[in-house]
Image (cartoon, rainbow, N blue to C red):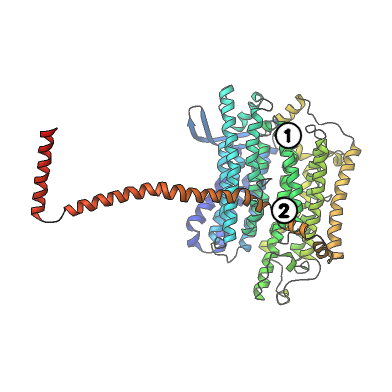
Amino acid sequence: MFEYVWLIPLFPLIGVVINGLFGKSIKNEKIIGGIGSLMVFGSFLVSCSILFKLLSLPSEERLFELNLFTWIQSGNFKADIGFLIDPLSALMIMVVTGVGFLIHLYSIGYMHGEEGFYRYFTYLNLFTFSMLLLVLGNNLLLMFVGWEGVGLCSYLLIGYYFHKKSAGDAGKKAFVMNRVGDFGFLLGLFTLFWYLGHNHNVWTINFVQLGQASHLLPIGGVVTIITLCFFLGATGKSAQIPLYTWLPDAMEGPTPVSALIHAATMVTAGVYMIGRMNFIFIKAPETMLVIACVGAATAIFAATIGTAQNDIKRVLAYSTVSQLGFMFLAMGVGAFAAGVFHLMTHAFFKACLFLGSGSVIHSMHHALHHAHSHDDAQDMRNMGGLKSKMPITFLTFLVSTIAIAGIPGFSGFFSKDEILWQAFANPYHGNLNYILWGTGAVAAGFTAFYMFRLVFMTFFGECRINPKAKDHLHESPFVITLPLMVLGTLAVVGGYVGIPKLIGEMFGGIPNYFEHYLEPVFRISEEFAKEHGHAAAHHSASLEWGLMGTSVIIAVIGISIAYALYIVSPSIPAKFTAAFPGLHKAVYNKWYIDELYDFLFVNPCKAIGRFLWKGFDVLVVDGIVNGVAKTVIGFSAVLRNIQSGYVHNYAFSMALGMVVIVGYYIFR
């Protein structure tokens, strides 16, 4: 079965070709959407077959490489078009194709009647193809092709409504900020290739061969530089401090695009890349510390911003930035499996949340359109009381919110709690572990608060929509609610594949299947940690229970505060804003980070650009070109005067020329 892995990226590529070339002529939305969705579903079926085949093998045999052909060969450098199947890539293709298919299916209903429907599905298939290339590529260069592909597709899809200036600006912002990170990725790639080749005659960028050669890499030193470069790439793609500001602005794209970017594809690429090269990162303790600190800081920083936003999609955007921070925190403390586990559970509940918000916006748009109202359909202050109007959307949204809040029994609890425990108990960062755990726990409390704030403002209380539009609110069609029900179910049960050892022992010693499944991928890192005295320290079960209970209590406190402020006493938030206007304004304006970046980077770059344009391009470059043109014109004018058309003038010119020539030979 493994030899058919090439079909997984091929199916979406076929969808790109069909809809891209013929979609405008087909015109029928059902056919266009059906083609795009079925191609991804085909990839999902092949992915399922590969996963089941992989699970049937012993753990030490769960590795397969398929090299289709040599892509580039120059001297010692060689890059193949090849695919790698192991537990990590098999999991990722399941997430990408499974969640991706549901988003494609949802899009058929959500994007109905939109101009450029075929263009949308072409971009969506291309996005899926690029992400599959990224996770399946067996070498760094092929991964980079997919890496750049998802960056390009994000630009195309974020700016899908290109007639809106804000959408165009958001697309450009995402594209430019990701180029900063991509530069770091390339630097890391070139430095790693050069170091292993120049010092150890190992000229390779193949992941399997890099893992086999990882013992040749020193601890720290050049490896720190290499991993910091790769981490810069990860911060851009996965929206971490300082390269996170593009992601909230990505809300300008259609809502299903937001779900695809935030849940199944682009923003998970940085986490996947670090997990894929764990055997290199584990040898750079300084980089691991940076990753952990940046992840924790991003988690708490983005969570504070989410508490003051009123746009339903913007709240979810900052929750994505924050949850990605948890994943990077896990990677930074060496809990690679926990980080990947949270990546998977987050894909389930975040896709459901974004698609649920799209269902709400879809209904709000419809109702406001009938009422001829220009109110903002995404502003939660215009909502309220929607649970009775949209019961399926409400229930699926609620269970996903409970999951992201980390309430026991739901998927987010298992992955988030494992990350917090590993942050506390990891053997790498000493006393800093307490700060990392505390920061993560507080960020989880903020998450519970702002997510239930969103639920209470949207679905509870009095309906604040325009009275004329109220009667037009309704549940979304089945093609929209079906993906919500599937994802809502996964948001509940998806975490049970990774039950922590502490809880598993209560039920007859149930193992952590997820950690065991990924063990072959992270075996080199585990062995390195044991050899260098970084094996996980033993802590009492009572301590782990205590920390788990504390994190749950913090989440419950966050929910309780949201309930008190937005259900019991909804007038308090306005009073708080009036009492602390400066604080509220700062949080609402995202701590003015965008303005700071404009001042430090954007405006100086514009000034330099204007100077180079006026001072160099116009005066020097254009001056040389225009000067040559004027010289030719002047010389031509002289020659034109000679060409008078009179024979005696030509005879005089010939005689004068002969006199000059004779004179030259006489007097030389």
Q: Residue furthest bottom?
A: 468
Spot occupied by residue 197 in the image (x, y as percentages of width and height): 56, 25
Spot occupied by residue 4 in the image (x, y as percentages of width and height): 58, 41
Spot occupied by residue 442 in the image (x, y as percentages of width and height): 82, 48
The residue under label 1 is which amino acid type? Glu
Q: Is residue 464 visible?
A: yes
Q: Quadrant of the C terminus?
A: top left
Circle 2 or circle 1, nearest the eye: 2
Between 101 and 530, the residue placed more toward the observer is 530
Q: Rate crowding at label 2 as few (under 14), some (14 to 19) or many (20 or more) other CA atoms within 10 Å.
A: some
Q: What's the distance in space between the residues labelled 2 and 1, CA to CA?
A: 41 Å
Instruction: Please tell me which of labels 2 and 1 falls first in the chain.
Output: 1
Asked which secondary structure carries label 2, the reply is helix
Between 291 and 667, the residue placed more toward the observer is 667
Q: Rate crowding at label 1 as few (under 14), some (14 to 19) or many (20 or more) other CA atoms within 10 Å.
A: some
Spot occupied by residue 503 in the image (x, y as percentages of width and height): 86, 42
Asked which quadrant contains residue 548, the reply is top right
Residue assigned mark 2: 591
Residue 519, labelled with which disc?
A: 1
Asked which quadrant contains residue 529, the reply is top right
Q: Quadrant of the N terminus?
A: top right
Above or below — where is 267 with respect to 69? below
The residue under label 2 is which amino acid type? Trp
Asked which secondary structure carries label 1, the reply is loop
Between 42 and 538, the residue placed more toward the observer is 538
Q: Is residue 48 visible?
A: no
Asked which quadrant contains residue 66, the reply is top right
From the viewer's perspective, tell me whether residue 140 is left or right of residue 387.
Answer: left
**Residue name at image x 63 percent, y 63 percent:** 109
Q: Are marks 2 and 1 in contact (CB under 8 Å)?
A: no
